[in-house]
Image (cartoon, rainbow, N blue to C red):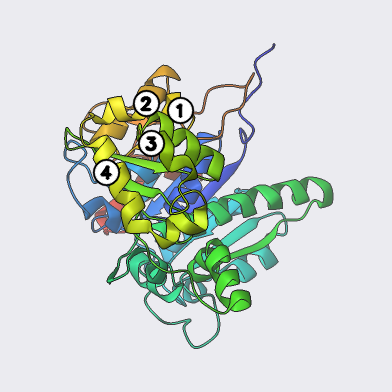
Amino acid sequence: MESQPLPLEGITVVAVEQAVAAPFATRQLADLGARVIKVERLDGGDFARGYDTAASGLASHFVWCNRGKESVALDLKDPRGLDVVRRLIADADVFVQNLAHGAAARLGLDAATLCAAHPRLIAVDISGYGPSGPYADKRAYDMLVQCEAGLVSVTGTAGQPVKAGIPAADIAAAMYAFSGVLAALVRRGTTGRGGPVEVAMLDALAEWMGHPLHHAMHGGTPPARTGLAHAVIAPYDGYRTGDGGRVLLSVQNDREWCRLAEHVLERPELAHDPAYATNAARVENRDRTDGLVVTALAGLTAEEAVARLEAAGIACALLRDVSDVAEHPQLAARDRWRDVRSPVGPLRALLPPITLPGGEAARMGPVPALGEHTEAVLRAVGMTGDEIAALRRDGVSA
């Protein structure tokens, strides 16, 4: 099969972005071939650059969300810096911003203003709570939106709600912004017109809360927090093994219970014991049911437990930590890792989940240093060496 170009080759994206939501969205576009010009503050750039130094001296959030982009450092409070961004937007296909509420409008960089001036432009506004309503001005860090969207209320144990261990609100907004851009590009291909795309973190995460929302709205009660257990299925939990590992297993029906009883618990008589023979009985006797599983797995290593469960046709998984995931045999077998260049040398990163058979590999370009591409981009918009030097001298550009 003849190799195909990446689907977004020839598309230019300008992003005034920070943190996770917008940067993760535009990274997807960069991986698919778009040119992404990231406009950053002069004083430290995207503040995600300062979150930590875990990635060989770079911030792990920044490395994750910003490969394959060109970094331009500008002072947008100076009219000359803002003029550079406007010049870039005039030649761009997509503009993305997630500035604080009202900041983009004050700069004339909100989607409505830009799309009125540039009919083919797709302009994306990403916010915490949307442009109107009583929450429009509220700070919208990921953890706060997780609370407002109810995710925290259904995550954790009966006694302790917890936030998700990943920035779920940011990621939800990013992926809807990404898919919104793709949809708008398709529409522009048929109509010739771009237009605004609006994504709010609360809207995105509330959509992901669809199951518990419908359960509560139509069933009358919100789902209980049950940790790794399942509220209405047993056995379904994470169970300790003899080597200190933990294996999650799930018995979905009574046929599976029979197999578990015979081949894993080695108690075939339990298959038809009225205390365990139906899921309703096992849920009613959850402590006793779980105790049987704990006893059976206590003499096995985690790997041995998984092997026995799989041989019996029982759904199961190892409870891995993030270091284990970095060495996951399935990811290795499918060659999902690549090295990405960065200012501190190559960094290991996962291929993006979208695979296009027959196409070019995802671009996965370098992680940029702050302002690394400023001069090249300024020259590309027509500035002379003297003009560039003046901007640098006056603290308008890096």
Q: Which residue is mark 4?
A: 294
Tag shown at residue 142: none
Q: Quadrant of the N terminus?
A: top right
Amino acid under disc 4: Val
Q: CA distance from mark 2 to mark 3?
A: 12 Å
Looking at marks 4 and 3 on the same chain, the residue that comes earlier in the sequence is marked by 4
Amino acid under disc 2: Arg
Q: Residue at x 28, y 58 (%)?
A: 47
Q: Which residue is mark 2?
A: 308
Q: Quadrant of residue 269?
A: top left
Query: What is the x, y in percent for residue 236?
Result: 41, 49
Tag shown at residue 317: 3
Q: Which residue is mark 1?
A: 312
Q: Secondary structure at mark 3?
A: strand
Q: CA distance from mark 4 to mark 3?
A: 15 Å
Q: Residue at x 61, y 50 (%)?
A: 179
Q: CA distance from mark 3 to mark 1?
A: 14 Å
Q: CA distance from mark 2 to mark 1?
A: 6 Å
Q: Residues within 10 Å of mark 4 (few under 14, many from 20)?
A: some
Looking at marks 3 and 1 on the same chain, the residue that comes earlier in the sequence is marked by 1
Which of discs 2 and 3 lies nearer the camera? The answer is 2
